Amino acid sequence: MEWIIMIVIIAFFAWRMMPKKGVKSISTEELKGMLKDNSKQFIDVRTPAEYKGRHISEFKNIPLNILKSKLETLDKEKETVVLCQSGMRSSQAANLLKKAGFSNVINVRGGMSTWRG
């Protein structure tokens, strides 16, 4: 019985982390081809310490825990690319942005842990 409860809990959290409809997912290799595109906005949702340790220069650091309060500083019409360490927090950020009315949101799968740049 306990294992059924565990499966339900895991399934629930996995479902919550799934990207919302309309959120595109790309690899870090695909990201490389986008970085010089000034029509996009790039957001790194890791903590300031993680960002300071290693980051991609085109990305602006807006930690996930304050992203909601910074939405008015972002352009809802621009394609928005979000990144974190592994792809989990950026998936949450992508869902938040989509829910807030951002029209084109992209999550970077694997995040900085798969970045080779």
Image (tube, rainbow, N blue to C red):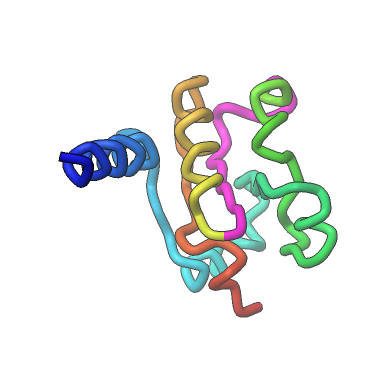
Q: Residue 107 appears at what percent x and percent y?
A: 48, 49
Left or right: where 47 falls relative to 109: right
Residue 22, visible in the rendered structure? no
The spot of residue 108 in percent (x, y) is: 50, 56
Asked if the magenta segment contains residue 96, the reply would be no
Residue 86 is situated, as x and y percent measured from the top left of the image, at 53, 59
Quadrant for the C terminus, please: bottom right
**Residue 29 appears anywhere in the view:** yes
- Taking 109 as reference, is 86 left or right? right
Taking the image as shown, residue 60 lies to the left or right of residue 39, namely right
Quarter containing the N terminus? top left
- The residue drawn where x is 53% and y is 64% is 31
Q: Nearer the viewer, residue 67 or 50?
A: 50
Residue depicted at x 71% and y 40%: 63
| Residue drawn 69% across the image and 49% down it | 46
Q: How many marks?
A: 0
Q: Residue at (65%, 37%) from the top-left corner?
A: 64
- Outermost bottom residue: 116
Name the spot of residue 67 as percent of width and height, x first. 67, 30
Hey, which quadrant is residue 32 in on the image?
A: bottom right
Judging depth in this view, the residue of 9 and 15 nearest the camera is: 9
From this view, report whether residue 101 is shown above or below residue 80.
above
Which image quadrant for residue 111? bottom right
Q: Magenta part of the protein: which range?
A: 72-85
Residue found at the far front of this picture:
1
